[in-house]
Image: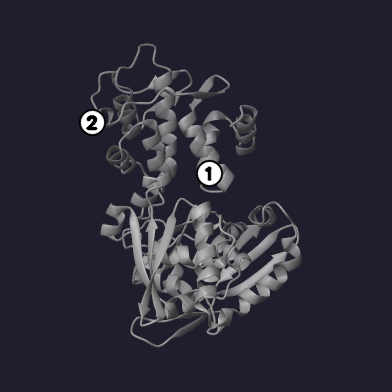
Amino acid sequence: MTKTTKKKEMTLVLRSEVYQSNPLIRAQKDFDITAMRLFFLGLRGLNPHFSDKDKYYDADFKEMLIPTDKLTELFGGNTWYLHDLEKVCDKMFRTVIKIRPEDGGFELYHLFRKLKYVPRKGLYIWFDELLRPYILDLFQSSGYTKLNVKYLFCLSSPYAVRLLELLLQYQNIKPFKEAQEIKRKLMVEEIRFALNVPEGSYGNRMDNFRKYVLDDPIREINKRTPYIVRYETVKKGRNVVAFEFTMDTFNVPVEEINGYKPNFGNDAIDLLYSIGFSEKAALAIFQKCDDVADCFSRVNRAQSILDRQKTKVKNKLGFLRKAIIEGWQVDGQSTKRKKSSSGVSDQAGKDMPPPKQKYLKIGREKMPYTIVKVYLKAIRTGEHMEIVNKALKEYNLTIKEFDELCQKHGL
C-alpha cells in the first residue's frame, strides 16, 4: 500500500446525515454524550451500501482520521476534551453493544477494532468488521434510519439523543409522513434497555424516571430541534407499563423528510435545483452526466456560456439545460456550441421561474452565488474536495484562494 493510498483511506469526509440499521437504533449502547458524538463522527465518514443500484459506496471499513480541528469544533472550540479523550476512548473500545433480534435472544458486539490518538494530528478510528450489516451493508439489514447530524449535535443529553433516534426510526412510515407526526408506543422495559437505564435506577420511582429519563430530555429536544415531542402514559392497573409518544415534524424542512432515500449525487441535484430546475428535470439532467464532478463542470461551463451571450436569452433554463446535456465547451472568449438556443422550450422553465442571479467576480469571469454556496458548503464540511478542486481550476483558483475570496466578500 502506497502512502498516497493510505492517506486517501484515512480521509474523513463529514456527511450531514448518518445511517444506522434499525436493529442498531434499538440496541443498547452504554454511551455518554461525548462517546455518542464520536460515534456519530465516525458514521459521518462512511458511505453505506443501500441497494444493488448504488454506484458509490464503501466496499469495506477503513481507518479514518478525525483531525484535531474537527475534534476541537466538536467540543465547542475548547481543547479541554484532550484531558478526557483517553478515558472516553478506553471506555468506548471496551463498550459492548447489545442487540436483541426480533426472533429473540441477544447479540453482543464491540464497536471499534482500533482507536488511536496522535497529538496535532487527531483521532484515528476503525469500526469492527462484524458491524458491517448494521452500519455499512444496509441493503442486507431489516430497514435503516437516516439521522440529521446537526439535530443530534444540538443535544447534550444522551437520553435525548436516544429518544430522538427511536422516534425517527418511524419517520418514513407513510401515514406518519403525511400527517407530519410520528407516533410510537414503547414499553418501559424497551426504554430502559435502549437508553441503558438499569433496573432500580432513580429509586424505582416512576416520577423520577419520567423526570430524568423522559421529561428533561424531551424538553431539550423541543427547545433545540425543530421536533416537538409529547407523550401519554399507558397503565395496567395502577402501574405505568408503557408510554405513547407523539412527535410533530411540521417544522422540519420538507426536503429533509422527502429526501429519505439516500443518493450521494444529491449535491449535484441540489445545484441544479437551486438554479431553477424542477426536481424531476434536475434528476433527468444529472442522469445525462457521467458523475457528480462532470455535472458540476458542465453547469460551470453552461453558466459561463450564458453570461457571454450578446443577445438576451428569453428561456434561460432551456438554454442551460441544452448546454449542460450537450456538454458545450468554452474556449477563451469564444463559445463552442450549436445554433443559438435562446428560443429553446423546456418543461423545467414552466415548473419554476429562474431566480435572479447574483455573481462572485473572479477576474473577468463571474460565478453565480448558487454555485458559490454549493462549493463553500463542500469546502467547509470537507465533502467532495476533489470535485470542487477540479471545478475551480477552470477559474484558475485553488480552494484556499477561493475560500479567501469568498470571505473577503462576506460569504
Q: Amino acid at mark 1?
A: Ala
The image quadrant where one finds the C terminus is: top right
User: What is the number of the mark on residue 22?
Assistant: none
**Residue, x 70% and y 66% (percent of image)?**
117
Task: Tell me: 261 left or right of 222.
Answer: left
Task: Tell me: 273 left or right of 5.
Answer: left
Mark 2 crowdedness (10 Å alpha carbons): few <14, some 14-19, many ≥20: few
Give the image location of residue 137, x and y in percent.
40, 68
The one nearer the camera, 344 or 26, is 26
Give the image location of residue 58, x and y in percent.
46, 62
CB-based contact (under 8 Å), mark 2 and mark 1: no
Residue furthest to the top:
311
**Residue, x 44% and y 42% (percent of image)?**
293
Q: Secondary structure at mark 2?
A: helix
Q: Quadrant of residue 39?
A: bottom right
Q: Quadrant of residue 395?
A: top right
Question: Which of pointers 2 and 1 lies earlier in the amino acid sequence?
Answer: 2
Q: Is residue 92 visible?
A: yes
Task: Look at mark 2 in the image and give the residue it sits on.
Answer: 347
Task: Look at mark 1 in the image and give the residue it sits on.
Answer: 378
Q: Is residue 49 visible?
A: no
**Residue, x 39% and y 21% (percent of image)?**
306
